[in-house]
Image (spheres, rainbow, N blue to C red):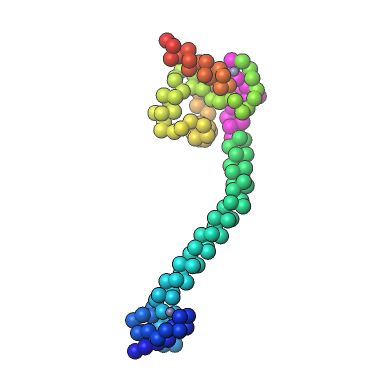
Amino acid sequence: MMKICSRCKKEKDYSEFHKSKSEKDGLSYRCKECQREVDRKYRTRRNAYAKIYYHEHKGDFLRRQTVSRQRMKKEILEHYSNGVARCAHCRGEDLVVLCLDHVNDDGAYHRRTLGIHGGYETYRRLKRDGFPEGYQVLCYNCNMRKHFELTKK
Ligand SMILES: [Zn+2]
Ligand SMILES: [Zn+2]
């Protein structure tokens, strides 16, 4: 049994066509080969659209993420500063350089044991755990200095 493919106009055996319930002879109007090609084209086009969409909105995604992270960081630091977020040593208030320090522990060691890379995962965890004690706010300078002093011992 032969059928002509509506796309490539070649006459092919029934086995060269996919089954299709919507066609009256029960076979797709395109041969398998043409169907494969159409599928592939559709897929590349869809991927291209997704890529374009992502590129056009990438800025929005990242901005939104940064804003919510900054807000969370501020909230956590304000809690551990009992008010305005500031460094416990030099009293600096620049949020960009402020970070959280584990008071009695080596911060790097602590982060490693929790299996996180520090930063926002730590903040999220602290908030979830209801602000456990043992942390202080330090700026990067004072933090570096503390770790320098620790490793010197
Ligand atoms: Zn065909
Ligand atoms: Zn400081």
What residue lies at 60% left-to-right and 20% top-to-bottom? 87
Res 137 quadrant in image: top right
Q: In the figure, is residue 64 to the left or right of 15?
A: right
Q: Position of residue 88 (x, y in %)?
A: 59, 17
What residue lies at 61% left-to-right and 51% top-to-bottom? 57
Q: In the figure, is residue 54 to the left or right of 93?
A: left
User: Is residue 38 within the magenta segment?
Assistant: no
Q: Position of residue 50 (x, y in %)?
A: 54, 57
- The quadrant in which the C terminus is found is top left
Q: Residue furthest top?
A: 153
What residue lies at 44% left-to-right and 28% top-to-bottom? 111
User: Is residue 78 within the magenta segment?
Assistant: yes
Quarter of the rendered structure image containing ligand 1:
bottom left
Note whether residue 46 is visible: yes
Between 152 and 122, the one lying in front of the other is 152
Residue 65 lies, with reference to residue 38, above or below; the image says above
Between 59 and 104, the one lying in front of the other is 59
Which span is picked out in magenta?
Answer: 72-89
Q: Position of residue 49 (x, y in %)?
A: 56, 60
- The quadrant in which the N terminus is found is bottom left
What residue lies at 45% left-to-right and 14% top-to-bottom? 150
Between 7 and 68, the one lying in front of the other is 7
Q: Position of residue 72 (x, y in %)?
A: 59, 35
